[in-house]
C-alpha cells in the first residue's frame, strides 16, 4: 500500500462515517432512531437489507472458497427468493400493522411474555456473540496480510461502527449502508474487470474442465452439503428464519414511508441476490484459473505465515514442499495447455484423455497443498485460525491491482465490515431496549427521550462487548467455527415459533414455548448424534426444516393435550 | 403495553405501483419467474462448461 491507497481507503471510510453521523446527529425521536426515517424509499431499504446480510466474509472469503471448491456454494442461496416472497406476503404486513419495533414484540402480543423473552433472548445471545466474529474474521486476515496490529484493527473498526450507529440509530445505518454498498459494487466490479484483462479467452472452459463450474448439483444425497435440494429446502428455511425473525434484518425493512417500500426492498433482494452471489463465485473460479496459469503461484496463499516458517528452524522442510509444488505446478500447466489444444481441436477422445491427465495432475498438486497446510498448522498453530482460501482474493488485490484500486478494494472490505456490524449493533440495541429493558421497566416506556438515551447506551455497550469478544476470540482457535454452528442450530426452533404464530391461530403461548424448547433439543440431538456417528451426519442446512417442523408438530400436539384454560397474554390477533 | 403505532394504518389495497405489475401477486410472480429463469440458466451453464 502506498499513500494513494491510504488516501482512498481513509477518505472513503471516514467520509461515509462522518456523513452518516452528521446527517443523523439530531435523531431524538424513538421511532426514527429504531426504525429509520419515515421517508426511506425501497431502494435504500433494499440496499440496507443486502448490506446487513453480506459481511466482509462474503467479499473476502467467498471468492477464495469458489477458487478452492468451485461455485457449488451458490446453491445455498436458492431458497432465498422464495423465503423473501413469504416474508413480504405474510411477515412484513403483520409487523407493520401492529407497529412493533421488534419481531419478538409481536410474539409477546400473539402469545405471552415468556415466549417473547425466549425469542429475544435467543436472538441477543446468538447475535451478540456473532457481532464479535463480524469484526474479528476480516480483521485477522487483513492484519496478517498487511502487517497491521490485530487488536488495533479490531478496536478501530468497532469504534467507527459504534460512533455512527449510536449517534443516528437506524437512520444512520440505512444512510451509510447505501453509500457503503456503492463502494462495494464499484470496487468488486473494478477487480473483476482487471482480472478479466489478465485471463485468456477460454478461461471459463479451463475452469469448467477443472471442475470449478458445477453451479447446480441434482444429486439427492442428504449428506452432500451443497445440492439443489439442500439449497432450495434448507436454504428456504434458513432464509425465512434469518429475514423473517432475525431483528438485524427485520429492522431494516420494518420502517420506510409505506408498506410498499419494505416490500419492494425485499423483492429487490429476491431478484438480484443470486445473480450477485454468482458474480462473486465466478470471480473466485476465474481467480483459480488465473493462478493456474501463473508461473510462480505459491503453494499456500497465506504467505506471511508461510515465509516466517521458511526463514525459521524448519525452513528446509518448507522449502522442500515448495520445490515439490513447483514441479507439480509446471506439470499441471503442461496438462492445461494439452487439454486446451485437444478441446480446440474438437477431438472428443483426445479431449477426454487430456482431461483425465489434467485431473490427475490437479489431484497431485492438491495433495501437496494439503501437506503444506498441515505442515504449516503443525509448526504454527495460529495458522489454524484462518483458511488458506481466505487469502486468495486479498493476495490478488495486493499483488495484481494498481495503486488506488488497492485502496478502493480495502475500502470495500472495511465498508462491508462496518455495514454488517452497524446493522447488528442497531438490532441488538433495539431488542435490548424494547424487549428486555422496557419489559423490566414498564413505567419508563412512555418517556421517549429516556428510551432513546437507553437505546443509545445499550447500542454502545453491545459495540464494546463485540470489540471485547473479538479481542478474546483471537486466543481461541476453533471458537469461530463453534459459534457458526451454534448460530445455525438455534434458528430453526425460533422460526417454528413464528410459523405457529402466523398460521396456527388456535395454538397458545405455553404450548409453543415448550414445543420450541423440545424442538431445540431434537435439533441438538440430531447434530451431536451426527458428530458422534459420522455415517449418520446430515448436511447442516437440513436442520432448518427439521427443527421448524418439530416445533410446529410439538405445538399442535401440546395444544391438543393442554387444558384450554391456559390463557395467552395477547392483546390482539394479527 | 406498546406505544401507539407511529405508522399510518396499512391500506389493504395498497398497490405496488410498479410499471407492468399492478398487484402484489404479480410482483411475487415476477420474482418467482426470475428465480426459475436464473436456476435454469445456471443449470445450462453447468452443463455447458462441465
Image (tube, coloured by chain):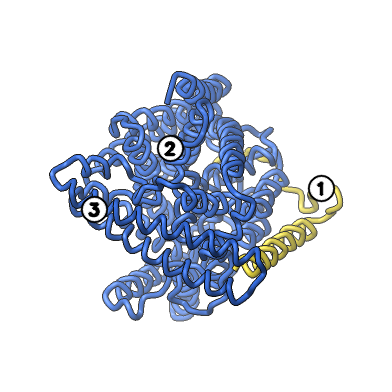
Chain colours: A blue, B yellow
Which residue: 82% across, 46% down?
B17
Q: How far apart in space, not on screen, are marks 1 and 2 (Cα)?
A: 44 Å
Locate residue A534: give its quadrant. bottom left
- Residue A195's x, y, as percent? 56, 42
Q: Position of residue A395 (x, y in %)?
A: 42, 41
Crowding at dot 3, Cα within 10 Å, few <14 / some 14-19 / many 20+, comes out as few
Residue A379 in sight in this render: yes
Q: Which residue is mark 3?
A: A320
User: Which residue is disc 1 drawn over?
Assistant: B18
Residue at x 47% of width, y 22% of height: A10
Task: Give how far apart the Cα atoms at labels 3 and 1 are.
Answer: 63 Å
Vertical comparison of A458 with A338: above or below? above
Placement of the C terminus of chain A among the 4 image quadrants: bottom right
Q: Is label 3 in a helix, a strand or a loop?
A: helix
Quarter of the N terminus of chain A within the rendering: top left
Q: Name the subunit of mark 2.
A: A
Q: Which residue was labeled with disc 2? A: A443
- Report the front residue among A498 and B43: B43
Q: Is residue A193 above or below residue A6?
A: below
Q: Residue furthest left?
A: A313
Label 1 Cα neighbours within 10 Å, binned few <14 / some 14-19 / many ≥20: few
Asked whether the residues under the numbered discs 3 and 2 touch, taking CB atoms below 8 Å apart as contact, a structural biologist would say no
The reply to whether the C-beta atoms of the residues labelled 1 and 2 are less than 8 Å apart is no
Amino acid at each position: 500500500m502506498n499513500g494513494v491507497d491510504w488516501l482512498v481507503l481513509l477518505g472513503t471510510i471516514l467520509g461515509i462515517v462522518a456523513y452518516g453521523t452528521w446527517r443523523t446527529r439530531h435523531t431524538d425521536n424513538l421511532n426514527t432512531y429504531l426504525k429509520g426515517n419515515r421517508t426511506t424509499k425501497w431502494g435504500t431499504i433494499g440496499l440496507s437489507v443486502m448490506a446487513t446480510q453480506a459481511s466482509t466474509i462474503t467479499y473476502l472469503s467467498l471468492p477464495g472458497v469458489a477458487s478452492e471448491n468451485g461455485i457449488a456454494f451458490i446453491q445455498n442461496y436458492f431458497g432465498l427468493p422464495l423465503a423473501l416472497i413469504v416474508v413480504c406476503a405474510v411477515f412484513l404486513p403483520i409487523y407493520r400493522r401492529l407497529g412493533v419495533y421488534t419481531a419478538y414484540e409481536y410474539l409477546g402480543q400473539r402469545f405471552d411474555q415468556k415466549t417473547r423473552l425466549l425469542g429475544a433472548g435467543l436472538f441477543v445471545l446468538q447475535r451478540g456473540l456473532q457481532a464479535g466474529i463480524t469484526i474479528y474474521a476480516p480483521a485477522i486476515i487483513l492484519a496478517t496480510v498487511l502487517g497491521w496490529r490485530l487488536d488495533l484493527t479490531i478496536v478501530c473498526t468497532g469504534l467507527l461502527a459504534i460512533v455512527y450507529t449510536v449517534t443516528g440509530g437506524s437512520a444512520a445505518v440505512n444512510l451509510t449502508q447505501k453509500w457503503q454498498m456503492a463502494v462495494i459494487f464499484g470496487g468488486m466490479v473494478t477487480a473483476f474487470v482487471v482480472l478479466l484483462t489478465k485471463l485468456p479467452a477460454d478461461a471459463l472452459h479451463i475452469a469448467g474442465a477443472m471442475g470449478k463450474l458445477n453451479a447446480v448439483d441434482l444429486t439427492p444425497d442428504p449428506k452432500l452439503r451443497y445440492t439443489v435440494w439442500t439449497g432450495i429446502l434448507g436454504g428456504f428455511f434458513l432464509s425465512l428464519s434469518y429475514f423473517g425473525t432475525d431483528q438485524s434484518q427485520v429492522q431494516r425493512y420494518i420502517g420506510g414511508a409505506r408498506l410498499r417500500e419494505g416490500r419492494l426492498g425485499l423483492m429487490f433482494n429476491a431478484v438480484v441476490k443470486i445473480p450477485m452471489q454468482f458474480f462473486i463465485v465466478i470471480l473466485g473460479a476465474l481467480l483459480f484459473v488465473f493462478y493456474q496459469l501463473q508461473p510462480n503461484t505459491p503453494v499456500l496463499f497465506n504467505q506471511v505465515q508461510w515465509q516466517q516458517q521458511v526463514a525459521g528452524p524448519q525452513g528446509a522442510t518448507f522449502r522442500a514442499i515448495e520445490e515439490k509444488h513447483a514441479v507439480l505446478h509446471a506439470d499441471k500447466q503442461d496438462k492445461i495447455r494439452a487439454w486446451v489444444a485437444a478441446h480446440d481441436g474438437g477431438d472428443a477422445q483426445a479431449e477426454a484423455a487430456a482431461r483425465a491427465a489434467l485431473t490427475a495432475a490437479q489431484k497431485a498438486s492438491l495433495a501437496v497443498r494439503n501437506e503444506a497446510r498441515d505442515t504449516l498448522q503443525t509448526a504454527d498453530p495460529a495458522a489454524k485460525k484462518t483458511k488458506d482460501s481466505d487469502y486468495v482474493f486479498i493476495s490478488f488485490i495486493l499483488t495484481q491491482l494498481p495503486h488506488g484500486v488497492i485502496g478502493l478494494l480495502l475500502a470495500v472490505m472495511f465498508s462491508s465490515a462496518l455495514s454488517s456490524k452497524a446493522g447488528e449493533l442497531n438490532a441488538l440495541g433495539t431488542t435490548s431496549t424494547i424487549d428486555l429493558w422496557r419489559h423490566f421497566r414498564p413505567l419508563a416506556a412512555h418517556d421517549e427521550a429516556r428510551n432513546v438515551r437507553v437505546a443509545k447506551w445499550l447500542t454502545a455497550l453491545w459495540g464494546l462487548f463485540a470489540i471485547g469478544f473479538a479481542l478474546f476470540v483471537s486466543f481461541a482457535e476453533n471458537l469461530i467455527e463453534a459459534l457458526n454452528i451454534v448460530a445455525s442450530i438455534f434458528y430453526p426452533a425460533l422460526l417454528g415459533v413464528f410459523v405457529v404464530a402466523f398460521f396456527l391461530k388456535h395454538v397458545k403461548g405455553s404450548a409453543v414455548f415448550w414445543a420450541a424448547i423440545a424442538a431445540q433439543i431434537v435439533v441438538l440431538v440430531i447434530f451431536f448424534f451426527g458428530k458422534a456417528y459420522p455415517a449418520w451426519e446430515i448436511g447442516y442446512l437440513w436442520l432448518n426444516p427439521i427443527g421448524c417442523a418439530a416445533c410446529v408438530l410439538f405445538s399442535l400436539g401440546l395444544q391438543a393435550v393442554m387444558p384450554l384454560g391456559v390463557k395467552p397474554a395477547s392483546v390482539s390477533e394479527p | 403495553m406498546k406505544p401507539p403505532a407511529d405508522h399510518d394504518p396499512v391500506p389493504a389495497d395498497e398497490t405496488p405501483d410498479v410499471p407492468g405489475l399492478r398487484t402484489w401477486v404479480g410482483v411475487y410472480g415476477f420474482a418467482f419467474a426470475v428465480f426459475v429463469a436464473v436456476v435454469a440458466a445456471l443449470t445450462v451453464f453447468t452443463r455447458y462448461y462441465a
